Image (cartoon, rainbow, N blue to C red):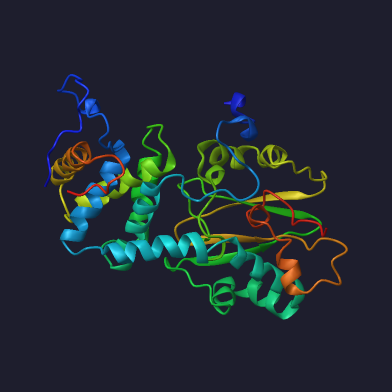
Amino acid sequence: MSEHHNDTHGHAHGHSHDHGDNSHLDEMDARVRALESLLVEKGYVESAAIDEIIQTYETKIGPRNGAHVVAKAWTEPEFAQRLKDDATAAIHSLGYTSRQGEHMEAVFNSDDTHHLVVCTLCSCYPWSVLGLPPTWYKSPPFRSKAVIDPRGVLADFGIKLPDNVAVEVHDSTAETRYLVIPQRPAGTGGLNADQLADLVNRNSMIGTAFADNPA
Amino acid sequence: MPECKSGPELRQLPDMVLDGDEPVFNEPWEAQAFAMTVSLYEKGQFTWDEWASALTAEIHSGEIRDYYRHWLIALEKLVTAKNLTSAGALNQREQDWHDAAARTPHGEPIEL
């Protein structure tokens, strides 16, 4: 291991940040390295498996899975019914299986009910269909305000609902995750399922947005 | 507590992106902490309920931290509670990584 000094310009020694051109790790970076290196040495985890999980969540699992589910529900009444009856099985039938094995519930927006999903406890989220949660979903203000003032939250997101539309708030748990099925936008009768899926944005499946209107 | 009737406007909070896609991890260590948790769970070191309870306890500890800081601290506590490693070993190894960084020229991979 080479221990030579790069410090050729006469700085005082004795402080770690005086190492000039040498590296520095932030606290959390060092902590995560400490934990991972210890667990790898003991055989509890493998670095390759960790990298594979990161890659999967960054590239393969994301809101497009949920958009596929929604578009299929819009175009196939029989699939929509299966989603209502047993969302876990219906979603699994499309190949989207959860690593955590949680129970899924699909809640359908209608002319008189708008659904909004929150997790007041921590950050339970339907990972298998939406990937990882956005920052705002994990934030304390959203988690508290969604329950106290759901219409206020929707207003923050630029959604104004008519007074006759009820807002139902669903609190996710480790066991049960909710997927909102937004209403199909008007004027989309001629679109196929792939084109419809493009209209289904992530927030619309949490209840903080509507599906996009066709261009 | 009537003054809590309506919370802060989410849009006015710093770093709050309400629409569109955002990166799911802001820094690589967040992804490492996340994936280690999933991997340990898949290997049966703890149940997902145990993990959710650990994370919930950390988030509701009263400490104001970023989400993934809560996450990593919850994971450290859970793996030490499960005796997969100890707090002492973690502290020592964290210092080892800082020492390794300090002797590594910038741009080269940091190794213990």
Question: What's the residue at 13%, 46% (across, down)?
Answer: B89
The answer to which of B4 and A135 lies nearer the viewer is: A135
**Which quarter of the image is occupied by the N terminus of chain B?**
top right
Q: What x and y, as percent, mark residue A17? A: 25, 27
Above or below, B75 against A142 in this view is below
Q: Single out the residue that lies furthest toward the right.
A: A187
Residue B92 figure quarter: top left
Residue farthest front in this picture? A8
Q: Position of residue B91 (x, y in %)?
A: 17, 40
Locate residue A51 relative to residue A35 in the image: left or right.
right
Residue A65, position as x, y percentages in the image: 59, 67
Using the rendered image of the protein, determine whether residue B82 is visible from the camera's viewpoint: no
Q: Is residue A161 above or below residue A74?
A: above
Please tell me in which quadrant of the rendered image residue A28 appears.
Answer: top left
Indicate left or right for B81 with B71 as reference: left
Q: Front-most of A91 and A170?
A: A91
**A9 shown above or below B78:** above
Can residue A43 be seen? yes
Name the residue at 72% across, 60% down: A182
At x 44%, y 58%, the residue is A174
Residue drawn at point x = 29 percent, y = 36 percent: A27
Q: In the visual, does A71 lie left or right of A125?
A: right
Q: How many marks?
A: 0
Figure quadrant of residue A201: bottom right
Could you tell me residue A9's position as x and y percent? 22, 23
